[in-house]
Image: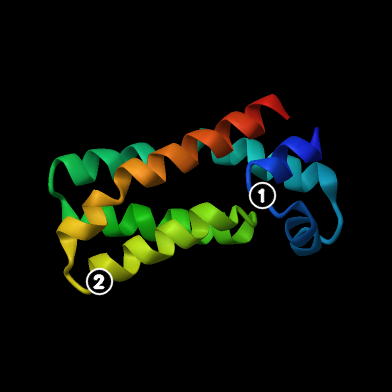
Amino acid sequence: MNYELLENAGIDTETALGRFMGNKALFERFLKKFLEDKNFEKLKNAVCEDDRNAALESSHTLKGVCGNLALNELYALFSEQVTLMREDNWNKAAGMMDSIEAVYNRVTEAIKNA
């Protein structure tokens, strides 16, 4: 796996590998699992359908996964979105989706190409 591509996409591979006790194979397996995770699609659908509970659940799950994998930019975006949702600032939270999707697409492309 090309770690430079991952770093360029904002993935802190050094921190992530520390969490995985230096086990590159395990880290890479979890990155691939991230590509298969359905929570981003669930989040998009929930926002479109104005299902606030489902949106919060998906965004919160993604926040945790991104934190564990050191996908720092995504983690920060999901953290902000979760906070906004919990503060009942739905319009601002939903309005973040374009920014989140752009970063999500950049990160997932880097993982696929790495």
Of the numbered discs 1 and 2, the one sitting upstream in the chain is 1
Q: Is residue 61 visible?
A: yes
User: Whole-percent x and y of residue 47?
Assistant: 21, 46
User: Of residues 63 and 10, which is closer to you in this image?
Assistant: 10
Real-space CA distance between mark 1 and mark 2, rounded to the nearest whole angstrom: 27 Å
Residue at horizontal 48%, vertical 40%?
A: 104
Quickly name the residue at label 1. 11
Kindly state the secondary structure of the residue where label 2 is placed. Answer: helix
Q: Amino acid at mark 1?
A: Ile
* Label number found at residue 79: none
In this rendering, which labeled residue sits more in front, label 1 or label 2?
Answer: 1
Left/right of residue 26 with respect to residue 41 in the rendered view: right
Relative side of 64 to 5, left or right = left
Q: Position of residue 34 (x, y in %)?
A: 56, 41
Q: Quadrant of the N terminus?
A: top right
Q: Residues within 10 Å of mark 1 (few under 14, many from 20)?
A: many
As drawn, the label of residue 86 is 2
> In the rendered view, how is the structure colored?
rainbow
Query: Which residue lies at the image location 43% right of the left edge and 38% below the top edge?
Result: 102
Residue 38 in sight from this viewpoint? no
Q: Position of residue 24 (x, y in %)?
A: 83, 46
At horizontal 23% and vertical 50% (from top left) the residue drawn is 95
> Which part of the image, by quadrant, shows the C terminus?
top right
